[in-house]
Amino acid sequence: MTRIGIIGSGHIGGNLARLFSAAGHDVLVSFSTDPAKLAELAAGAGAVVLSVPWGVLDQAIKQAGGPGALAGRTVIDTTNQFGRVDGRFGVLDLGGQSAAARNAAKVPGAAWIKAFNTLTAGFQASSAGRTGPDRVVMFYATGDDAAARLAGELITSAGFDPVRTGTLARTEVGHQEPKGDLYGEEFHHDDAVAAVARLRGTPPSGKGRP
């Protein structure tokens, strides 16, 4: 059982709260913008899920006590780099950096995991818990092997098959981010492992789902 703090009241965060609670984890969800409450939540959790819109991530980190409060913690980042592009909602150009690496650099002392970002909250809710060959894969990435083990355990307990895309390098995690070939698609274990092996070490094609 892991004590999990979830910062963010959106669809992904709320869905993860239900899945983790059903699996027997001790889940604390913060809908608050009170910095003291958020910092207390972050301090008491074995893993912190940041599930907020891309544009308010800096504010969420600050309200959780800042980088120092999250240092030494395992942070699960569900965000995607969506924002205003030429006056429209779209995928932001991060200049060759992955979204995960961009965010992890803001909290250098944390063990950063990118996960639960490739599939919609609705699909995650409806597909969690499938068994056998129909069990859905949840991709994740981290440069920390201990964090990888925890990510695998949490993803499994939430009802999915964990498949690691690699580190936070764009040629690895970038494939599970918007416009990457793994983003927005349903995968099952063997096909997912084969796809990761084929893609790892190459730049994202930019042709995947936005």
Image (tube, rainbow, N blue to C red):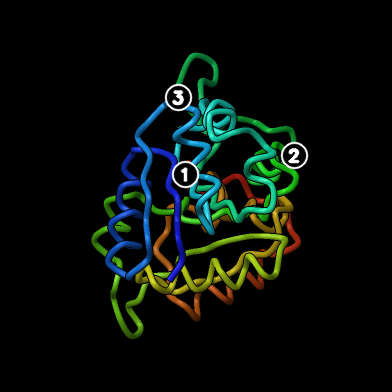
Residue at 68% x, 64% y: name it. 166
> What SS does tag 3 mark?
strand
The crowding category of the residue bearing disc 1, from other C-alpha atoms within 10 Å (few below 14, some 14 to 19, many at least 20), is many
Mark 1 highlights which residue?
A: 41
| Three-letter amino acid code at the position of disc 1 | Leu
Residue at 35% x, 71% y: name it. 159
Name the N-terminal-most of marks 1 and 2: 1
Tag nearer the camera, 1 or 2: 1
Q: Is residue 177 above or below residue 146?
A: above
Q: Position of residue 36 (x, y in %)?
A: 49, 30
Residue 173 location, quadrant? bottom right
Residue 136 location, quadrant? bottom left
Tag nearer the camera, 3 or 1: 1
| Three-letter amino acid code at the position of disc 3 | Phe
Name the N-terminal-most of marks 3 and 2: 3
Mark 3 highlights which residue?
A: 89
Q: Position of residue 73 (x, y in %)?
A: 62, 53
Mark 3–mark 1 Cα distance, whole angstroms, equals 32 Å
Q: Position of residue 179 (x, y in %)?
A: 55, 45
Mark 2 highlights which residue?
A: 96
| Three-letter amino acid code at the position of disc 2 | Gly
Q: Are marks 3 and 1 in contact (CB under 8 Å)?
A: no
Name the N-terminal-most of marks 3 and 1: 1
Mark 3–mark 2 Cα distance, whole angstroms, equals 20 Å
Mark 1–mark 2 Cα distance, whole angstroms, equals 33 Å
The crowding category of the residue bearing disc 2, from other C-alpha atoms within 10 Å (few below 14, some 14 to 19, many at least 20), is few
